[in-house]
Image (cartoon, rainbow, N blue to C red):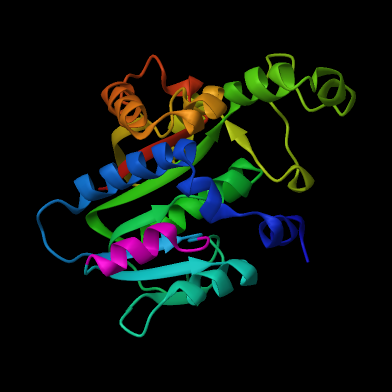
Amino acid sequence: MNYLEAYYNEYNEDGRLTSQHGQVEYITTQKYIHECIGNAGARKILEIGAGTGRYSIALSREGHDVTALELVDHNIDVMKSKLTENDTLKIVKGNALDLSSFADEEFDITLLLGPMYHLYSVKVKEKALSEAVRVTKKGGYILVAYCMNDPTVVQFVFGKGHLADVIEKQMLTSDWHTVSQPVDLFEMIRTEEIDELNKTASVERVKLVAADGATNYMREIVDAMDRETFFKWVEYHLSTCERQDLIGASHHTLDILRKV
């Protein structure tokens, strides 16, 4: 069992996305998925790294033809446990770096909402993106999620008091970029690195948005909000999530690409 499997065997991914602070990321991501779906009716959608199926199941139940590809057996088991006899979701075990079981230009929309969190070199990130682009129809959309570098420096390194530890482990460069290995589970990135990655694929950017904005800086406050206040917080977040001066400060970003 690798570090990733061990982590997700114990981690409650559904709980993260159903907490109030987690709902901000989920609501935001769904908003932009549905912008890509538009008014065209049922779409053929692939979610790469589908986790426990939060997005895939919801989209399938809306009537879309959805395939959920997931690497971790535990997540697949949880996803299957949620399905009813009426569900049509197709679940496939697989890796974001090898989509050879899918044809070129097979899907209208491809979601890559988790794998980039766990890929540790430019080469493998390029491979994951190129595979997602390959299986997407020309003119179709690829939505890619990233974990951002500087919120981690602010909140984890300084806010959680880990400065001495990360310096000792040589996990920071001289310009304050985090350095991650598989044992660390998550890989952080900056917007300029995302831009460079996109240059390697046949895509154009539609939008780069902050998936959670300031939410994770004030997680406890957001979770304690009454529903009326929470809905106002979401309203505020959605009104600012496309502001490019704020993007790098968001813990998660969503890059919305169109295949050209």
Question: At x 87% / y 29%, what residue is drawn?
Answer: 169
Q: Say above or below: 250 vs 154.
A: below
Q: Say above or below: 15 vs 157.
A: below
The answer to whether residue 52 is magenta is yes
The answer to whether residue 66 is magenta is no
Question: At x 30% / y 68%, what residue is drawn?
Answer: 60
Answer whether residue 135 is visible to the viewer in this image.
no
Residue positioned most to the right = 168
Residue 132 in the image, given as x and y percentages of width and height: 41, 57
Question: At x 65% / y 43%, what residue is drawn?
Answer: 121
Q: Is residue 224 left or right of residue 35?
A: right
The span shown in magenta is 51-62
Task: Look at the image and tell me in which quarter the N terminus lies.
Answer: bottom right
Nearest to the observer: residue 186 or residue 124:
186
Mainly helix, strand or loop, the magenta region? helix
Question: At x 33% / y 69%, what residue is drawn?
Answer: 66
Nearest to the observer: residue 83 or residue 226:
226
Residue 179 in the image, given as x and y percentages of width and height: 73, 31
Residue 109 in the image, given as x and y percentages of width and height: 29, 57
Residue 114 in the image, given as x and y percentages of width and height: 52, 50
Q: Is residue 32 left or right of residue 135?
A: left
State which quadrant residue 63 falls in. Answer: bottom left
